[in-house]
Image (tube, rainbow, N blue to C red):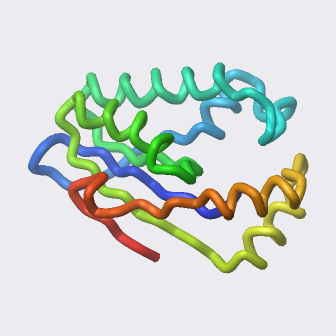
């Protein structure tokens, strides 16, 4: 799904400055980005992304985490990780029109079946300000 948000994490009292981590990037580093479908179990990729986030957090580096986390419950796992390190959490939420999301999906090398995409859109829970220090809606 292309509807997603960035969680920008920075040390307490500071704003996001630079760096980015994304689950897709973690998959690339594992050499798995070409052979994992969006509907596959992505546990290994998620673990790699979590570890990359921990490395940034331990080093005190500011970074952005780019992910498609359609429900509050899924986002909460990431947000709790960032909060455990005292990060300032800013969510940037992007939601293009459904037609755009479906068109972008069709252009992917390994697209998600449209039926699955529509089911995911039905489950979509946009983030709220209660999940972060700052929420930007675009």
Residue at position x 74%, y 27% in the image: 41
Q: Quadrant of residue 60?
A: top left
Q: Is residue 21 above or below residue 50?
A: below
Residue shown at 89%/53% (left/top)? 113
Quarter where residue 1 is shown: bottom right
Is 49 on the left or on the right of 116, as rendered? Answer: left
| Residue in the picture at 55% in, 48% down | 69
- Residue 20 in view here: no
Residue farthest to the left, as pictured? 13
User: In this image, 88 relative to 9: left or right?
Assistant: left
Residue 128 vs 45, above or below: the answer is: below
Q: Is residue 17 or residue 66 the one in the foreground?
A: 66
Q: Is residue 132 above or below residue 106?
A: above
x and y, in percent, of residue 71 in the image: 52, 50
Rendering coords of residue 61 (x, y %): 28, 36
Q: 15 above or below 102?
A: above
Asked if one can make out residue 19 in the rendered structure from this viewpoint, the answer is yes
Q: Nearer the viewer, residue 36 or 34?
A: 36
Q: 43 or 71: which is nearer to us?
A: 71
**In x, y percent, where is residue 25?**
62, 37
Q: Is residue 18 left or right of residue 68?
A: left
**Total numbered labels placed on residues in the image:** 0
Estimate the x, y position of residue 8 in percent, counting from the top left: 35, 51
Q: Is residue 109 left or right of residue 122?
A: right
Residue lying at 74% horizontally and 69% vertically, measured from the top left: 101
Front residue of 47/52: it is 47
Quadrant in the picture for residue 78:
top left
């Amino acid at each position: 799904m292309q509807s997603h948000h960035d969680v920008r994490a920075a040390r307490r009292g500071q704003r996001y400055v630079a760096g980015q981590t994304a689950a897709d990037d973690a998959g690339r580093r594992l050499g798995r980005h070409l052979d994992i479908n969006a509907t596959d179990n992505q546990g290994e990729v998620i673990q790699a992304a979590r570890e990359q986030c921990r490395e940034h957090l331990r080093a005190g580096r500011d970074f952005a985490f780019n992910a498609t986390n359609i429900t509050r419950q899924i986002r909460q796992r990431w947000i709790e990780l960032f909060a455990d390190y005292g990060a300032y959490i800013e969510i940037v939420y992007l939601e293009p029109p459904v037609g755009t999301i479906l068109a972008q999906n069709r252009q992917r090398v390994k697209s998600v079946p449209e039926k699955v995409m529509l089911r995911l859109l039905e489950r979509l829970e946009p983030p709220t300000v209660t999940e972060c220090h700052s929420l930007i809606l675009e």
